[in-house]
Amino acid sequence: MSANASLLIPRHARGWRMGLANMLAKEMAAWWRTRRWWIQCLVALLVLNAMQELNLRNGMRADNVGLTFLEIAALCVPLAAISMAQDTILGERHSGTAAWVLSKPLRRPAFILAKLIAHGLGLLVAWVLLPGTLIYFQLKAHGALQLSGTGFVGAMALDYLNLLFYITLALMLATLFHSRGPVLGIALVVAWSGPMQFIAQPMEKYAPWLDSVLPWRLLMPIGNTSPLAGYLAMGQPLPTVVPIIATALWCVLFVCVAIWRFRREEF
């Protein structure tokens, strides 16, 4: 047997999983065998942690720094998730790579799921685990003794749920539209309507129920209430779990719509 032939490992998956392992390996390699992973990690640390270290050294209270960290994450993490998730679909569609890959033994649900898993894991490491671990020790070093270790893990889980919402939203929009403008525009309006007060205040007046069905309350203070991640980080009981459940359901819905729409795409 030749060396090249020995590298050909047969896959026996059937149904919607056909081609998932190969596609996932390709997407994971694009993350971890290129410069992408360390560039994303470096940008995340500069955006999320460097400014907080300056705030701590300038005497800002540790609890206020923690809230600032969550607010910046609410603004910047969705931008990273949306940019990468929409480009992974639209970039391959425009270059013709998607049509070529789908001519192989690869089912379309596997195409979507491979990209979701690879980008979900990559962004988890770069934008949640690494900066989250660092900010925990930064706050502890500056006197945040009331910070709960297990609660902080829960807070980072909400951070990741927020990130997943925007990954799946961008993937869905990228299957519905053929250009980047509508995808970025719609996704960013959803992401920043809660944090931006000049938009949030009219919504609080005319549609206050949006706070409960969208992920804004996970990381952002809405009105006079603290973010849900803040309650967890301090070891306090959550006032509500409705935004958490709603966000998880949105993620499932977005993935289902993306798969449904992509299965009807003609290449």
Image (cartoon, rainbow, N blue to C red):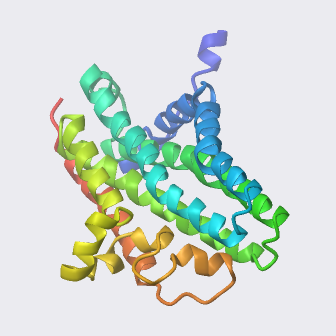
Q: Residue 262 appears in which quarter of the rendering?
A: top left
**In the rendered view, would you say 60 is above or below 52?**
below
Q: Residue furthest top?
A: 2
The residue that appears at 82% across and 70% down in the rendered structure is: 143
Q: Residue 87 appears in which quarter of the rendering?
A: top left
Q: Position of residue 60 (x, y in %)?
A: 69, 64
Left or right: 209, with 168 as reference point: left
Tell how many labels.
0
**In the rendered view, would you say 241 is above or below 220?**
below
Q: Nearer the viewer, residue 108 or 167?
A: 167
Image quarter in which the N terminus is found: top right
Is residue 262 something one can see in this rendering? Answer: no
**In the rendered view, would you say 199 is above or below 40?**
below
The residue that appears at 38% across and 46% down in the rendered structure is: 82
Q: Position of residue 32 (x, y in %)?
A: 62, 32
Is residue 96 something one can see in this rendering? Answer: yes
**In the rendered view, would you say 235 is above or below 86?**
below
Q: Nearer the viewer, residue 60 or 94?
A: 60
Q: Position of residue 164 (x, y in %)?
A: 45, 57
Image quarter in which the C terminus is found: top left
Q: Position of residue 216 (x, y in %)?
A: 40, 69
Left or right: 139, with 189 as reference point: right
Q: Residue 112 appears in which quarter of the rendering?
A: top left
The residue that appears at 34% across and 71% down in the rendered structure is: 214
